[in-house]
Image (tube, rainbow, N blue to C red):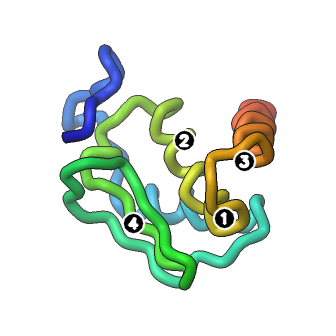
């Protein structure tokens, strides 16, 4: 079972609409330089997101109600996995760079 970050849960009235969320994912995918061929938001029991080598990216419904900073991190991680399929040093370096890049936009 996935663990929600403490104190980061947002009430339903602060939830991001699904279409806005999907638009944000596509925007980050373009910044990262990857193509998300399929984008799904559905219930997931154990994780916040996943991606496949075919370009399918899936996010958990509950992510729409999480704090913006946490949501952004997950949104960046999944398309980044389309470029780098592991959590190695290069992945972590690029993730940090994109997270900081997003702060200045």
Res. 29 mark: 1
Res. 20 mark: none
x 19%, y 51%: residue? 45
* Marks 1 & 3, CB-CB < 8 Å contact: no
Res. 58 mark: 4
Counting labels gives: 4
Residue 63 on image: x %, y %: 34, 45
**CA distance separating discs 4 and 2:** 14 Å
Q: Looking at the picture, does residue 83 appear above or below residue 74?
A: below
Q: Nearer the viewer, mark 4 or mark 2?
A: 4
* Residue placed under numbered mark 2 in the picture: 72
Secondary structure, mark 4, is strand
**CA distance separating discs 3 and 4:** 19 Å
**CA distance separating discs 1 and 2:** 12 Å
Q: Looking at the image, is mark 1 or mark 3 earlier in the sequence? A: 1
Res. 91 mark: 3
Q: Looking at the image, is mark 3 or mark 2 earlier in the sequence? A: 2
Q: Nearer the viewer, mark 4 or mark 1?
A: 4
Q: Looking at the image, is mark 3 or mark 4 earlier in the sequence? A: 4
Q: Nearer the viewer, mark 1 or mark 3?
A: 3
Secondary structure, mark 2, is helix
């Amino acid at each position: 079972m996935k663990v929600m970050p403490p104190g980061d849960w947002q009430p339903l009235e602060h939830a991001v609409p699904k279409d806005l969320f999907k638009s944000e994912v596509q925007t980050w995918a373009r910044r990262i330089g990857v193509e998300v061929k399929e984008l799904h938001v559905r219930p997931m029991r154990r994780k916040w997101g996943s991606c496949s080598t075919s370009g399918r990216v899936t996010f958990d419904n509950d992510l729409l109600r999480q704090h913006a900073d946490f949501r952004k991190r997950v949104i960046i991680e999944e398309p980044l996995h389309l470029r780098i399929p592991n959590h190695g040093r290069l992945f972590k370096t690029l993730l940090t760079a994109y997270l900081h890049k997003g702060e200045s936009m």
